[in-house]
Image (cartoon, coloured by chain):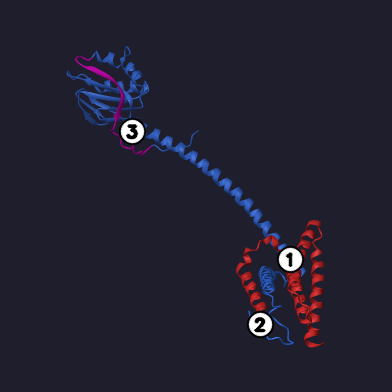
Chain colours: A red, B blue
Amino acid sequence: MLVIVSLFAGIGLGVAFHSAVPFSWAPYLPMAVMAALDSVFGGLRARLEGTFDDRVFVISFLSNAVLAALLVWAGIRLGVQDIAIAVVVVFGVRIFQNLAAIRRILFHA
Amino acid sequence: MKKQPETGAPDTSGSGRPRGQIAIALTLTLLGFLLATQLRSQQGLAQRLSIERESDLGQILTQLTDRSDQLSSEIVDLRVKLAQASGTQAQQHALIDDARQQLQALQILLGLVPVKGPGIVMVFSDPGGTVGPDVLLDAVQELRDAGAEAIEVSGVRAVASTSFTGSPRSILVNRQPVSAPYEVTAIGPASTLAEAMRIPGGVVDSLAAHSGASVRITEEGSVSILHVAALPQFVHARPTARR
């Protein structure tokens, strides 16, 4: 319940204040979102597996998002903008693995 | 905070620790915020660009570049036109100023406007009735020679077309009868004008030949000539090309 409420509160805030986000964030935001999604699915999987720990969840969420954004920033600085693809692939694969694990737990398949 | 009954089903309210709950809530709020922001910022761009293929995008780019070039050259054209127009305007201003000065000079010369300035006033008294139109004409000519810019004779503005006719006691200035004492007002360099009247063989000198006539000349710092002449109507004379 809390999860859904806070998620929607965040979406509401984002819709209301999306213009407050500087344009220069444009390259980093999608990576941070990918990382955050990965953490959330990881957390969900851990919850279903019974190994969920809120500290691990919060820290991994924040650190993943920040690290992803930092990686992109470093890539831009080094002239390898395509490093974003690496981030996308890594987090994409991890999201898929997490979803597969969740699916296996929920549907036993 | 709602506690779910402890069953085998996953507990959606978290681990039960309030601090952990708040942290999770804040984290998820952040996720929602990030998601919404990202989706919103991508929306406009995605709607326009994601449906286009690479070649189409290239075409769009070419079109936009062409349009940009077109507009740039238009800007240059308009700048040139603007510069030309303002140049013409300055020229026109100069022409108008010239014309205005010319108009003013001609208005004074033709006696169309009242004028004011330093000058002299001459009063011819003629108790004997011996002063003829020639004396006044001489005076006017002498005044012009001495640099008078505007002259008035007994209430008649003396201009290029002014005539002095008649005979002593019935002098006509511009066919208008005037009577003694005749008053001549002239605007110009006052002392020069007065001197010109007094030179030997000049107006004052020759007036001595007429019995009883005398002239009084006063130099003034500022005299007014308020009478104006009518604008002459030219019937026969037509401007022609200069040869």
Of callouts 1 and 3, the N-terminal one: 1
Circle 3: residue type: Gly
Q: Mark 1 points at which residue?
A: B59
Residue range corresponding to the magenta coloring: B210-236
What is the chain letter for disc 3?
A: B
Q: In this view, does A33 lie above or below B16?
A: above
Distance from label 2 to label 3 (Cα)?
A: 110 Å
Which of the labelled discs sits on residue B111, or is there none?
3
Residue at the spot 41% in from the left edge and 36% down from the top edge: B103
Tell me the SS state at disc 3: loop
Q: Are marks 2 and 1 on the same chain?
A: yes
Mark 2 nearby-residue class (10 Å; few <14, some 14–19, many ≥20): few
Q: Report the side of B239 relative to B171 (left or right).
A: right
Any part of residue B47 in sight: no
What is the chain letter for disc 2?
A: B
Circle 1: residue type: Gln
Q: Which of B67 and B136 is in front in this view?
A: B67
Q: Name the residue under label 2.
A: B3
Circle 2: residue type: Lys
Of callouts 2 and 3, the N-terminal one: 2
Q: Do labels 2 and 3 share a chain?
A: yes
Residue A81 falls inside the magenta stretch = no
Q: Position of residue B153 (x, y in %)?
A: 27, 27
Tell me the SS state at disc 1: helix
Q: Nearer the viewer, residue B59 or B190?
A: B59
Q: Report the side of B229 relative to B15 (left or right).
A: left
